[in-house]
Image: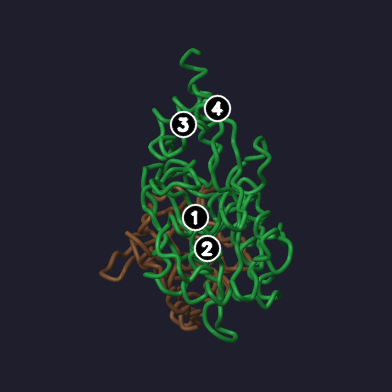
């Protein structure tokens, strides 16, 4: 299966409503751990790449006006996926990333630390971050 | 008391918090913390769905307050937003900013609510009476109305019957009072309503040196809103989740006793 063919079977996730605010209040003492963690707004990947236990490598980080895109490559067969974040999401190229599948989505971690969360439909319904007062 | 003892006393005072008030922590989350926090959020959403309620008082155990006989540290209002299959739970609550003397209101998902590295991955909620739910629901959906009873000057141990500061659980309690009492226009009137209906805060016994240490080192702890006769008797009254739950049951504002969710 060619890379293009693999990328054509996209898992497309709709935008997380309040993601721009998700990083806006990391200064809040009571802020959740998730607000410090990039949360994907969309992901394009062959389904097999987003499987629990998958070992990936971060091969590209692209910043744009609308956020950040990570390109991750699976070590075993070079299958790639791209993950879009609404805000800044930094990580070093070449970082070895482990995928953990949970009922609410996928946790991406590196060296034992969570570096991003990709919510599925259940997870998206549980996530919202909006500051009401200044 | 030497400096080490004062520091220890300060740390004790800091954990007396009526809500989590830790300094900002940039330590990355572990996969387990994300997994467990989201799992608790999902389990709580399912339990809330099953109640048929529109508004509940939702609490978490952000810190270990067992030495004060308290089980929960922080509460907010969870309400059902939207209709049908697309409906989801949102939490409106007040958060202290990085251990500073200020706080703001937030509307968050259950995920964010339980991802704050809680002391225990457990939740408690109280279904409010139908009347209380009906009064609170429009208020929680409206940012201006939700902020009506909000005071940004934050004190983790704010006195329940003063208006100089306001801690997180106190905002929720006064907002409930303001929603129930159509004539209430001020925080003082909301507090008067609570007194009239028998709300009793928790009394914490905090000695002078501990107060001094906390006052000197923590921007989000103050005692100058407490009446002198109570303060100098080491009696610090503040709004706690446990005291709110007890009062909701006594006052008839709870539809049924608290329910608990754990992983």
Q: Which residue is mark 1?
A: B191
| Residue at x-position 29% and y-position 64% | A63
Closer to the camera, A71 or B75?
A: B75
Secondary structure type for disc 2: helix
Determine the CA span between mark 3 and mark 1.
19 Å
Both labels 3 and 1 in a single chain: yes
Secondary structure type for disc 4: loop
From this view, report whether residue B197 is shown above or below residue A124: above
Closer to the camera, B99 or B18?
A: B18
The answer to whether the residues at label 2 and label 1 have Cβ atoms under 8 Å apart is yes
Q: What tint does the image give chain B? A: green
Q: What tint does the image give chain A? A: brown
Q: How is the image coloured?
A: by chain
Mark 4 belongs to chain:
B
10 Å crowding of disc 2: few (<14), some (14-19), many (20+): many
Q: In the image, which is nearer the foreground, mark 3 or mark 2?
A: 3
Q: Which residue is mark 4?
A: B233
Determine the CA span between mark 4 and mark 2.
29 Å
């Amino acid at each position: 299966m060619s890379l293009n063919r693999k990328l054509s079977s996209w898992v497309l996730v709709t935008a997380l409503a309040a993601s721009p605010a998700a990083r806006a209040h990391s200064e809040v003492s009571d802020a959740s751990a998730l607000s410090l963690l990039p949360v994907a707004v969309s992901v394009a990947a062959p389904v097999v790449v987003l499987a629990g236990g998958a070992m990936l490598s971060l091969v590209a980080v692209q910043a744009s006006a609308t956020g950040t895109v990570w390109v991750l490559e699976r070590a075993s067969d070079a299958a790639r996926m791209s993950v879009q974040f609404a805000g800044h999401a930094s990580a070093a190229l070449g970082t070895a990333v482990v995928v953990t599948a949970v009922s609410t989505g996928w946790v991406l971690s590196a060296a034992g630390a969570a570096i991003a969360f990709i919510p599925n439909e259940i997870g998206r319904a549980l996530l919202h971050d909006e500051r009401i007062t200044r | 008391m030497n400096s080490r003892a004062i520091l220890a006393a300060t740390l004790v005072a800091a954990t007396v918090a009526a809500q989590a008030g830790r300094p900002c922590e940039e330590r990355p989350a572990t996969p387990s913390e994300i997994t467990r926090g989201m799992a608790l959020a999902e389990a709580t959403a399912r339990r809330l769905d099953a109640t048929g309620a529109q508004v509940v008082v939702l609490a978490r155990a952000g810190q270990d307050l067992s030495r004060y006989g308290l089980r929960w540290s922080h509460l907010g209002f969870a309400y059902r937003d939207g209709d049908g299959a697309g409906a989801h739970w949102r939490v409106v609550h007040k958060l202290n900013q990085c251990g500073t003397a200020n706080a703001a209101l937030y509307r968050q998902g259950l995920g964010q609510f339980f991802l704050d590295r809680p002391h225990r991955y457990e939740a408690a909620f109280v279904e409010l009476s139908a009347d209380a739910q009906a009064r609170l629901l429009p208020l929680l959906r409206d940012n201006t109305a939700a902020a009506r009873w909000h005071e940004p000057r934050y004190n983790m141990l704010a006195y329940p019957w003063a208006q100089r500061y306001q801690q997180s659980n106190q905002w929720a309690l006064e907002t409930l009072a303001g929603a129930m009492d159509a004539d209430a226009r001020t925080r003082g009137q909301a507090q008067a309503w609570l007194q009239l209906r028998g709300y009793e805060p928790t009394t914490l016994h905090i000695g002078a040196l501990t107060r001094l240490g906390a006052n000197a080192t923590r921007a989000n702890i103050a005692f100058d809103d407490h009446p002198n006769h109570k303060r100098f008797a080491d009696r610090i009254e503040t709004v706690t989740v446990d005291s709110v739950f007890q009062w909701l049951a006594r006052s008839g504002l709870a539809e049924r006793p608290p329910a608990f969710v754990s992983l």
